[in-house]
Image (cartoon, rainbow, N blue to C red):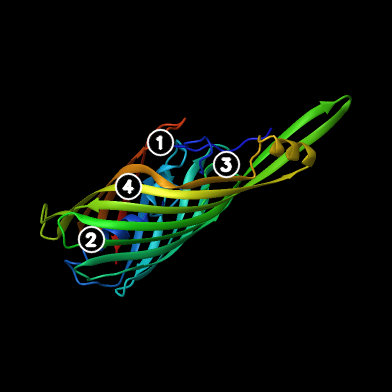
């Protein structure tokens, strides 16, 4: 009756469990800041993909278990010409037990350094409001800090990103058993508190084509190679009506109280960003492919994707 949620790419079978569609537009609009003067605007966006964990952190997104369902992410945002922005979104999906529903909501204040020819810089904080911590479709990350710094002037743009994430998720085990002639109702509610640090080194180049179908359209393609490193700590607590059994299993090592991973290089990734814009509309497909560097019982290769349509006014 006691179990721990499993996740992809686990070097020791104890890995922890990284997407709001507004992030695609924000990231790709930043590529234009050296071409167009910054301006304030609102954005309405509708996206679809398979990411739940983080808006920006691909390292976290690559560790999620395949949810085998599409996630729809409508969002709205305001982006000021100073670089400050605020966006909000909702994650809609088909839950096997609840039907089509919202699994969580997001709120993201952020800052982007605009109109700088040499340095690219951004910082964001995302809070995820989770409806059901026991749901397999909910992100274990509820507080996600992410910052990135890059140098723009070279043909290959080097960059570094740092993320710090915290959150929790829960599991509930329930079992009815007979002891003699007496029926007992046994339950164990397990809470996992996660703290994760990420460091990502990247090398990228931006390709741009203008006036493809009209005088007002642009196409941007931004591939990047990424080396992911990080560490995490998971504190495990139990609430149960069989404390003696739980304490016995903990002492025998069957139920860990603390799961940790040392800081190390974890995976190599390829991130592909595209955006086609015409007038006030833009279409943004994005894909991320990740290869885990260590031995694992799970698949070493994972991928995530998102496609969004945006209207700016």
**Quadrant in which the C terminus is drawn:** bottom left
Where is mark 3, residue-wise? 98
Mark closer to the chain start, 3 or 4: 3
Cα–Cα span, label 2 and label 4: 21 Å
- At 66% from the left edge and 44% from the top edge, which residue is drawn? 190
Cα–Cα span, label 4 and label 1: 13 Å
Where is mark 4, residue-wise? 227
Pinpoint residue 228: horizontal percent, then vertical percent.
Answer: 36, 47
Q: Residue furthest top?
A: 180
Cα–Cα span, label 3 and label 2: 40 Å
In which quadrant of the rendered view does residue 34 lie? bottom left
Q: Residues within 10 Å of mark 4 (few under 14, many from 20)?
A: some
Cα–Cα span, label 3 and label 4: 38 Å
Q: Is residue 18 above or below residue 290?
A: below
Residue 136 vs residue 211, the one in the foreground: 136
Asked if the residues shown at circle 3 and circle 2 are in contact, with their CB atoms under 8 angstroms apart, the answer is no
Q: Is residue 288 visible?
A: no
Where is mark 2, residue-wise? 31
Cα–Cα span, label 3 and label 1: 37 Å
Mark closer to the chain start, 4 or 1: 4
- At 11% from the left edge and 52% from the top edge, which residue is drawn? 212
Q: Is residue 136 above or below residue 29?
A: above
Q: Residue furthest bottom?
A: 82
Asked if the residues shown at circle 1 and circle 2 are in contact, with their CB atoms under 8 angstroms apart, the answer is no
Where is mark 1, residue-wise? 294
Q: Residue furthest right?
A: 181
Mark closer to the chain start, 3 or 1: 3
Q: Is residue 161 visible?
A: yes
Cα–Cα span, label 1 and label 2: 34 Å
In which quadrant of the rendered view does residue 243 lie? top right
Residue 257 vs residue 191, the one in the foreground: 257
> Left of 73 or right of it: where is 190?
right
């Amino acid at each position: 009756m006691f179990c721990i949620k499993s996740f992809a790419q686990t070097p020791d079978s104890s890995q922890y469990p990284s997407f709001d569609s507004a992030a695609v537009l924000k990231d790709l609009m930043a590529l234009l800041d050296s071409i167009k003067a910054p301006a304030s605007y609102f954005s309405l966006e509708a996206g679809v993909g398979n990411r739940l964990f983080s808006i920006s952190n691909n390292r976290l997104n690559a560790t999620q278990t395949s949810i085998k369902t599409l996630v729809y992410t409508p969002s709205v945002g305001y982006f000021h010409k100073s670089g400050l922005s605020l966006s909000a979104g909702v994650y809609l999906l088909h839950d096997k037990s609840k039907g089509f529903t919202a699994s969580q909501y997001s709120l993201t204040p952020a800052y982007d350094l605009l109109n700088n020819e040499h340095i690219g810089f951004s910082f964001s904080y995302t809070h995820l409001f989770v409806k059901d911590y026991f749901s397999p479709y909910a992100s274990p990350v509820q507080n996600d800090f992410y910052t990135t710094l890059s140098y723009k002037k070279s043909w290959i743009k080097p960059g570094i990103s740092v993320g710090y994430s915290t959150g929790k998720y829960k599991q509930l085990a329930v079992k009815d058993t007979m002891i003699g002639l007496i029926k007992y109702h046994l339950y164990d509610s397990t809470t996992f508190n996660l703290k994760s640090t990420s460091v990502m080194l990247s090398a990228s180049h931006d390709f741009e084509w203008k006036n493809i179908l009209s005088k007002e359209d642009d196409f941007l393609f931004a591939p990047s190679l990424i080396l992911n490193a990080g560490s995490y700590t998971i504190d495990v607590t139990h609430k149960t009506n069989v404390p003696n059994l739980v304490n016995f299993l903990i002492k025998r090592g069957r139920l860990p109280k603390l799961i940790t991973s040392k800081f190390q290089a974890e995976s190599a990734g390829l991130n592909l960003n595209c955006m086609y814009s015409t007038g006030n509309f833009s279409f943004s497909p994005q894909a991320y492919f990740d290869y885990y560097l260590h031995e694992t019982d799970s698949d070493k290769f994972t991928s995530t994707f998102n496609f969004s349509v945006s209207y700016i006014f």
